[in-house]
Image (cartoon, grey):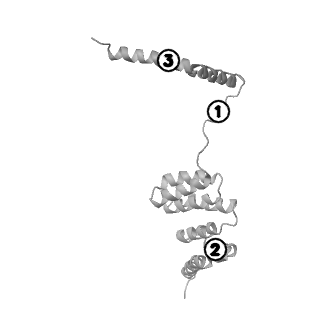
Amino acid sequence: MGKSKFLDIIDNTKAIKKTMISRGYIRSQFISLCCLFLFFSCGLSEIKLLDDPLTAQEHLDLGLSYEKINEVDPAIKQYEMAAKSLPVAYLYLGNVYFKKNNFDEAVNNYKEAIRKDPQNSDAYNNLAWLYYTKKENLEEAEKLVLKAMTINPSKENIYLDTLDKIRILNRQNKKILTPSY
């Protein structure tokens, strides 16, 4: 009878080792191990194996893609990665949290977007819209929209819609609070 498969594997392994030795693979492995030993013996204990292969803009774009298909949690993760370098990512985080009805997180992210980029007119408008939605801080909401219009007059029509709704709600609230005789 011939050799068993087990023996064939052992014979193949021996042949592979001979080939590796003759081609210098073992020598290069030895050199690699020596380099690692020197690296660690020098006290350099921190190794950064991989950097993030995506740019902040790519994380932002990926977050938008997730958001488009209603994958909110992966979108949040991508926006958080983008926010390390791109302040506008806080606007997107605010929007996602707003959609999730997590208003506290939305407010925090809109405020962070404004703090990191005071020229982000959409962050002012969206924070104002959130206040309108919650029916609170309407005076502040009005100021935020007016600031957005000052920063970016090209979006005035969009911001005017927010402002009108806030002012209408504000008037209705004042009528309710004012007793009629």
* Residue in front for this viewpoint, 168 or 73: 73
**Residue that label 3 marks:** 17
Q: CA distance from mark 1 to mark 3?
A: 31 Å
Q: Nearer the viewer, mark 2 or mark 1?
A: 1
| Residue drawn at (32%, 14%) of the image | 4
Q: Amino acid at mark 2?
A: Val
Per the rendering, the mark at residue 47 is: 1
Name of the residue lying farthest toward the bottom: 181
Q: Of helix, strand and loop, which one carries label 3?
A: helix
Placement of the N terminus among the 4 image quadrants: top left
Q: CA distance from mark 2 to mark 3?
A: 73 Å
Classify 10 Å Cα crowding around label 3: few (below 14), some (14-19), many (20 and above).
some
Name of the residue lying farthest toward the left: 1
The image quadrant of residue 124 is: bottom right
Placement of the C terminus among the 4 image quadrants: bottom right
Earlier sequence position, callout 2 versus callout 1: 1
Q: Amino acid at mark 1?
A: Ile
Relative vertical location of residue 81 with respect to residue 173 in this rendering, above or below:
above
Relative vertical location of residue 34 with respect to residue 46 in this rendering, above or below:
above
Q: x%, y% of residue 169?
A: 55, 78
